[in-house]
Amino acid sequence: MTEPLLRIKGLVKHYPGRRRLFGPRPAPTRAIDGISFDIHAGETLGLVGESGCGKSTTGRAILQLVRPTAGQVRYRHQDLTALPAAQMRDLRREMQMIFQDPYSSLDPRMRVADLIAEPLDIHGIARGPARREKVAELLDAVGLPASALSRYPHEFSGGQRQRIGIARALALSPKFIVADEAVSALDVSIQAQVINLMQDLQDRLGLTYLFISHNLNVVRHISDRVGVMYLGQLVEIGTSRDVFARPLHPYTRALIDAAPSLNARRRERVILQGEVPKAGVPRGCIFRSRCPEARALCATDRPQPREADGRLVACHNIS
Amino acid sequence: MSCPAPIAALAPDLLTIRNLRVHFPGQTGEVLAVDGVDLTLRAGEIVGLVGESGSGKSVTAMSILRLVPGARSSGQIALEGRDLIGLGAAEMRALRGDRIGMVFQNPMTSLNPAYTIGNQLIEAVRLHRPLGRGAARKLALTRLAEVGLTDAARVFTSYPHELSGGMRQRAMIAMAMICAPALLIADEPTTALGVTTQAQILHLLDRLRREHGTAILLITHDLAVVAAICDRVAVMYAGSVVEEAPSDDLIDRPRHPYTRALIEAIPSETGDRRRLYSIPGAALMRPDAQACAFAPRCATASERCRAARPPLITSGARGLRCWHPLEVSP
């Protein structure tokens, strides 16, 4: 297999506990606790998990929008975590982000033409007629009419605003895009339009996506491979087809079983008891407190990701 | 997860809504948020009210509670035979929290952050029941245990911020159920929750309606949530119910083009990378009252659809507002 576009190795992001006036410093919050995976050029890697599992932090840590506590993010033979800020800024042209909320990520006082041109201006790429041409091209690529140029964000619906966000992300001709809950705030019919658009753009421009979402059906639809996160760790990663058809990790199974579905209605579900704990644990398996199959070993040894059935699974009961 | 509809089908009508219209004053004239909604709920039944943003589903629900400030409503809303639209403010207040319970998407906006869960529950009971503090406390603890809060005594003395999102939603359901209401209105009760917590809460709602015979009006944008627990479902578009049917019928055999589009826009579980079906355009804020509101986005719309608004025709358990219903294979 060819060298992956991105190789994430042992990525960690800990946030220090807030110091109280008296008493010991609390333990750090382990937002991401040592995860490793590859992203191949041209693929869509889905990242799923419930709120607080660290999937958004992972996306941000890869782009160096938050500085990782430890670990490496290798992109084309360079470790992004060790790169000086100026070089990182140049590289950022190649890696962009699409956010969940197209309402709060667009400056309400800027016209669409300027919003889309902003990345071009910041990186000093195009001016004058070239700038206008590029903006028109981007607008066309995301399926917005030319009349949109002189209008403001509030004049658009949620789906149209997300198209503006996508045009901004595409402005610098990136290779890699992190889409963080990019369609989660949209109505189903609009969500379908935006997903179709993202797939068309990928086919046309050869983009690579890290698609972060809590919506399993959407991730299953758009992703070639999928990683499942729980409490800052990657518990399973494999092809979408394998993971959804035959989930191996007990958490993946519980997650898929809990997701409401049109096809499997009113089935007897195995409902996972309890809730996601507030923080990760320093030792043992992070899922053991809710796992129906936990045994003594799970409390003492952290399971390492191991190859099983064509994918990686971090569970002592899978061999 | 739940039994099929027949039990509820024999139950008496609990809530009937007839030709509900809700207007809001706007800068450029009135906006018709709800345009002729008809809906019936029987005791013990879970009915889903589904639609996209702006379809009028929440305004319909809030109109039942008469909690739509500034709006002008007309039509009929009857609960247990009493007309709610003509009811005085004090009588309406007595009904809310007693015969009608409410659960919202974000429990933090409904719970008072300055009082413990226990104090809020006791207040809710004593507003409607002549109970002493001790008896009210006992009832509150019973309800907290009923909604699956295993450590009810601890939750009772906790402040809302000390609980997790799932626990807060359970506490709010306990408060909504405190007087064992005949009707529970749940507006996107699981939208803010994680997948595994959502499954727990849906399961809980289903259990509560069995134990108390409470009818539930579940407002949601998610047809899959409907599929999980609703007996019947009404689909709203631009302020009107366009189709109504038992949930399985509606999902397996939709007859309105909008319903079918909604179902087909959901990524399938076979996970193939086909293009998703998407509805062109977006819903209009002020559709033409003389035409079918969905006509501008409908693939099968004809001259007739643009010239006259189809009426809601009911036949058996199904209702439909369309001039050209989709054929249903038997």
Image: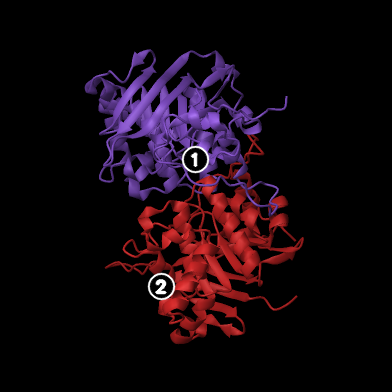
Residue A294 appears in view: no
Q: In which quarter of the image is residue B117?
A: top left
What colour denotes chain A? red
Chain of residue at mark 2? A
Q: Quadrant of residue B15?
A: top left
Q: In this view, does A16 lie to the left or right of A214?
A: left
Label 1 neighbour load within 10 Å: few <14, some 14-19, many 20+: many
> Residue drawn at (45%, 29%), measured in percent from left and top?
B217
- Residue B120 position within the rendered picture, expressed as x and y whole percent measured from the top left: 29, 36
Name the residue tied to disc 2: A118
Dot label at residue B221? 1
Give the CA distance from mark 1 to mark 2: 35 Å
Which chain is tinted purple?
Answer: B
Chain of residue at mark 1? B
The kind of secondary structure element at disc 2 is helix
Q: Is residue A284 above or below residue B239?
A: below
Q: In which quarter of the image is the N terminus of chain B?
A: top right
- Residue B248 position within the rendered picture, expressed as x and y whole percent measured from the top left: 63, 29
Q: Is residue B87 left or right of residue B155?
A: left
Q: Nearer the viewer, residue A316 or B67?
A: B67
Q: In which quarter of the image is the C terminus of chain B?
A: top right
Label 2 neighbour load within 10 Å: few <14, some 14-19, many 20+: some
Q: Quadrant of residue A104?
A: bottom left
Q: In this view, does A120 lie above or below A186?
A: below
